[in-house]
Amino acid sequence: MNKWADYCVSGVEYLRSRKHIEKARVHVDKGDKIGSREIWLREDIISKIDKGFNVITVYEGKNNGCWKRGAEIGIVEINGVKYLRTDKNEIEEDDWGSLPEIGF
């Protein structure tokens, strides 16, 4: 497996309002494998992207340890508020496509 990004996100938890993601399950992309998971807050992901790190979504395949690449996560800023999106649409909410929602 070639390195896809600096960090890979495999699951999210939205705030009750569903406008923002509260937490995400993040893995370091080690090039030959996806690292163990860490739980990051939304602000942590924004900080990494602002610093130039690449962050993508990933999906775990049926075989444990088999990952599929998803989309790049970017920031869309609207009226001074940063939103995390995979589609770059200027909509005032976070959206990471079909990434699984998980409870922590």
Image (cartoon, grey):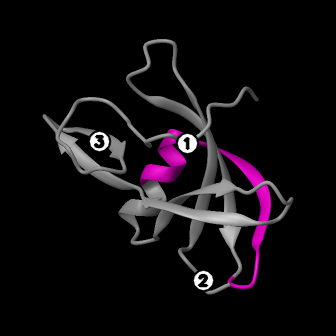
> At label 3, which amino acid type do we have?
Lys
Counting other residues with Cα less than 10 Å from the Cα at mark 2, is it few (<14), some (14-19), or many (20 or more)?
Answer: few
* Figure check: 5 above or below 59: below
List x then y, in percent, for residue 53.
Answer: 46, 71
Q: Earlier in the sequence, mark 3 or mark 2?
A: 2
Q: Which mark is residue 99?
A: 1
Closer to the eye: label 3 or 2: 2
List x then y, in percent, for residue 80.
Answer: 18, 38
Closer to the eye: label 3 or 1: 1
Q: Is residue 16 left or right of residue 46?
A: right
Q: Which mark is residue 27?
A: none
Q: Earlier in the sequence, mark 1 or mark 2?
A: 2
List the single residue furthest toward the top.
16
What stretch of residues is rendered in magenta?
A: 31-46
The residue lying toward the viewer, choosing from 60 and 90, is: 60
Counting other residues with Cα less than 10 Å from the Cα at mark 1, is it few (<14), some (14-19), or many (20 or more)?
Answer: some
The residue lying toward the viewer, choosing from 56 and 68, is: 68
| Residue at (53, 49) in percent of width and height | 44
| Residue at (46, 70) in percent of width and height | 54
> At label 2, which amino acid type do we have?
Lys
Q: Which mark is residue 82?
A: 3
> At label 1, which amino acid type do we have?
Leu
Image quarter where the N terminus lies is bottom right
Residue holding disc 2: 3
- Spatial CA distance of label 1 from label 2 is 20 Å
| Residue at (42, 28) in percent of width and height | 20
Q: Earlier in the sequence, mark 3 or mark 1?
A: 3
Q: Is residue 74 left or right of residue 2?
A: left
